[in-house]
Amino acid sequence: MNDLFPQDSAPRLGAPLGLARQRAIARRRRRRLIAAVTIPLAMVMVVAIGAIASESVRDIGRRFSGMVSTPPPADFEGPGTTEIRVDIPPGATGSAIGRLLYNAEVVASVGAFNAAFAAHPYAPGIQPGVAVMLTGMSAQDAVDRLVLNERLITRITFPENFTATQVFARIVAQTDITQEEIDAIVEDPSLIGLPEQAEGVIEGWLFPSTYDLSPYETAQSLLTRMVSQTVSVLTSLEVPEDRWRATLIEASIIEREAPNDDFYRAKVSRVIQNRLAINEPLGMDAIDAFGAGRPAHLITREEFRDPNNPWASRVHPGLPPHAIGSAGRAAIYAAANPVDGPWRWFVTVDLCTGETLFTGDYNEFLGFRAQYQAWRVANPDGAC
């Protein structure tokens, strides 16, 4: 028996459902349908509400930023007051330059300079070097001045054959370095890195070249560079350290006896080596002239033969006490690499053309000397 349905009305497999049962099934279907529609709709509404909220926040942000704006970076009005030198290193970016100028009180802020730098079409072309600026410049004025690339620098040239005295005189004449500063270096040459091989003598160790000097150059920094360059050349030419001093002395003689001619330099170098090998006095006018402080043709016979004169090259065998000037790379190379040959004498028979004759025969040398003397008679003032 079934309490709900009479015996004859109980449902059977495949038979139509009762009305109540059909209604229950219909309700469940409606609930599933509502759920299927409601959940996606709710999700859409959440997304929409989020988008509206986000848009509202952005709108509020825009309105707030309009009310509270970031102030512009500090900037001077210019045009500036006190002159100051700023050294801009190679490869410096706009920001790096801005920091240099800010630290030097040229501009009021790095930000103002960066803005002016970014707005100037030629700012990327700013070159390194020492620039003359003013304290208290506007950022725009600072960039305008820098793009002119007017850099403060002194360029000084020391030619071959210059003695240390001539080098010092040119430094004093063309820079702000004083003679007193140089004298202090001469008193203590270790301050400029003079090698032990120099035996405390600066002569011959100041490499002849063109040097760029910053406004802050000192006697010590410049002379250190010149000595360092000499050491660099000796090293690059693979001259043994124990030969540095002798090589520079020989090179200084070669530089004076055979200037501007590689062919003559190599032969003069061989003459020196051949005479040293047999302990024969070098007998070279350039040595005597350096010691006397005047041209060879103004030196007397007595002076040439004075045994008390350490520079009397016709009396004393071996090399002179030290170098007689600054030698360039070519002369140093010739001293370290003499050409093969039997020569022991050479004479420049024409001072105007520089024609120089070499020989290993003494009688032939006497003939060359007579030829030179004839030239001297024809050219008493030595004018060419």
Image: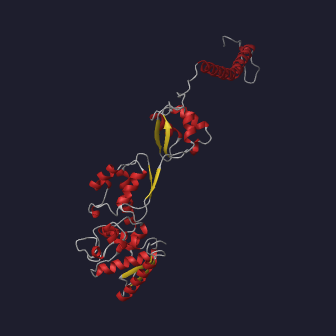
Residue at 38% across / 55% down in the picture?
A: 169
Residue closer to the observer: 75 or 187: 187
Picture layout, residue 211 above or below residue 18 = below
Residue closer to the observer: 38 or 20: 38
Residue at 58% across / 45% down in the picture?
A: 125
Asked whether residue 199 appears in the rendered view, the answer is yes
Residue closer to the observer: 244 or 311: 311
Q: Quadrant of residue 294?
A: bottom left
Question: Which image quarter is the N terminus in?
Answer: top right
Image x and y of residue 64, in percent? 60, 18
Residue at 40% across / 53% down in the picture?
A: 171
Q: Residue furthest top?
A: 3
Residue closer to the observer: 57 or 100: 100
Image x and y of residue 328, in percent? 41, 66
Q: Quadrant of residue 241?
A: bottom left
Picture layout, residue 179 above or below residue 297 = above
Number of numbered tags placed on the structure image? 0
Image x and y of residue 244, in percent? 32, 67
